Image: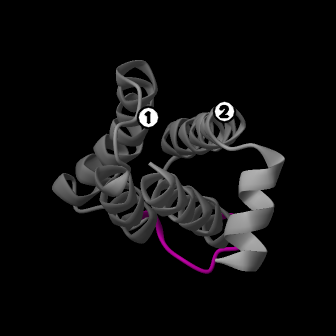
Amino acid sequence: MNDEKAYNYRQIKLMKAKVLFFHNNSIELFDIINDLESLLSHIKNPSAKWHTEFISWWANMESVYANAIYENRTNFDLQDIQIINEAIKNIEQLIEKYQKENFTEEDIIKFEYID
């Protein structure tokens, strides 16, 4: 269980980093969509509710991106940007919720500084 917990912590930590990179314009929408999907698929045994909520917000971003590609657009309109920003905000909240519900301060210290 402890190995699984440490593994999941690393996935959550990487998710947080990817969101930060996106906020800092260090990665594009395409990258965060793919990275978050990959990291989510590696979290072991998340609650069904959390997973469903995460996928729902992730899918909003993916739909905006897919529509832009389908319409051969290189820029996002105001509505697209609002959908992306709302999705990112809610994904950030879900990441924080997962961390608070699954890791104690002791876990975090151990995973950050000992392991």
Q: Position of residue 109 (x, y in %)?
A: 80, 63
Earlier sequence position, callout 1 versus callout 2: 1
In the picture of the structure, the residue carrying the numbered disc 2 is 97
Q: Choose top left, top right, bottom left or bottom right for residue 16.
A: bottom right
Do the numbered discs 1 and 2 sit on residues whose CB atoms are within 8 Å? no
Left/right of residue 68 with respect to residue 54 in the rendered view: left
Residue at x 55% of width, y 67% of height: 14
Left/right of residue 62 with respect to residue 100 in the rendered view: left
Magenta region includes residue 28: yes
**Residue toward you, 1 or 75:** 1
Distance (Cα) linking label 1 and label 2: 11 Å
Residue at x 80% of width, y 52% of height: 106
Q: Secondary structure at mark 1?
A: helix
Amino acid under disc 2: Lys
Task: Considering the whole magenta stretch, tell me its main secondary structure.
Answer: loop
- Looking at the rendering, the stretch of residues picked out in magenta corresponds to 23-29
Residue at x 33% of width, y 38% of height: 59
Quadrant housing the C terminus: bottom right
* 75 shown above or below 57: below
Magenta region includes residue 90: no
**Residue toward you, 111 or 69:** 111
In the picture of the structure, the residue carrying the numbered disc 1 is 54
Q: Position of residue 86 (x, y in %)?
A: 61, 35
Amino acid under disc 1: Phe
Q: Secondary structure at mark 2?
A: helix
